[in-house]
Image: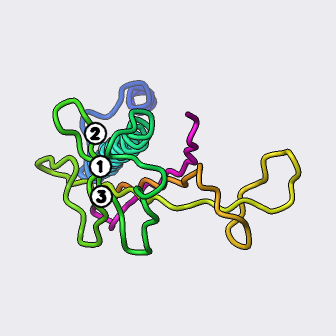
Amino acid sequence: MWNRSKHLLKLLLPAQGFTLIEVLVALALILTFTVGILSLYRLGLLSGTKATYALQARILAQEGMEAITVLRDTGGVSWDWSSTPSNTGASEYYQPSLTGSSWNLGSKMSTSPAPVLPTPNQKYTRTVKIDQVQRAVGCGSAICSIVTSGGVVDTGTRKITVTVEWSEEDGQKQIVIESYLTRWR
């Protein structure tokens, strides 16, 4: 009887301690989960940083496009449809700048662009290319579509390409936006 009671008591009452193996398994599980959570946290921070850089670049690109639109709308010496802005060659560009409250197109450049928005951790460069546009021939009274070659030069339309570049840990990044501006006045 005593043997039976002892066996029953052993089944009903849990063991009093953990073995070394149980402790090691528990520590390994905790360590695995902690490393996984920290890796996800780091990935989230890195993604957020990259998104911030890309957003700032998009804002600078849009600002560059708006600067060209303002220059076109205000006219003046910065924008003359017959002579300037002239076509930019393969390695040529403009770098608009804000002086006081007025945009200035600047002159055509071919050297390395200056940083637009230098920050402690990031430097962005913005370049603007301005190219003539060709339109298809023989459209009658309709406005002919834009073609890359073999058309007639449209003296009232320019193709604007704004490129913003910056560096990240995994290499050089860039955002390019393009638009067509017409002489509407």
Query: Dots 2 and 1: beta carbons under 8 Å?
Result: yes
Residue 80: give x, y in percent of width and height.
42, 49
In the figure, 149 relative to 145: above or below? below
Residue 169 is covered by the magenta coloring? yes
Residue 115 lies in what quarter of the image?
Answer: bottom left
The image quarter containing residue 34 is: top left
Between circles 3 and 1, the one closer to the viewer is 1
Read off the magenta span: 165-185
Numbered label attached to residue 96? 1
**Between marks 2 and 3 in the image, the one whose residue lies nearer the viewer:** 2
Residue 73, by quadrant, is: top left
Give the secondary structure at mark 2.
strand
| Lateral position of residue 98 relative to residue 147, left or right | left
The amino acid beneath tag 2 is Trp
**Residue 181 in magenta?**
yes
Residue linked to disc 2: 103
Percent x, y of residue 130 = 46, 58
- What residue did someone put label 3 on? 166
First along the sequence among labels 3 and 1: 1
What residue lies at 20% left-to-right and 46% top-to-bottom? 117
Q: Measured along the vertical axis of the image, is residue 53 above or below residue 149?
A: above
Spatial CA span between label 2 and label 1: 7 Å
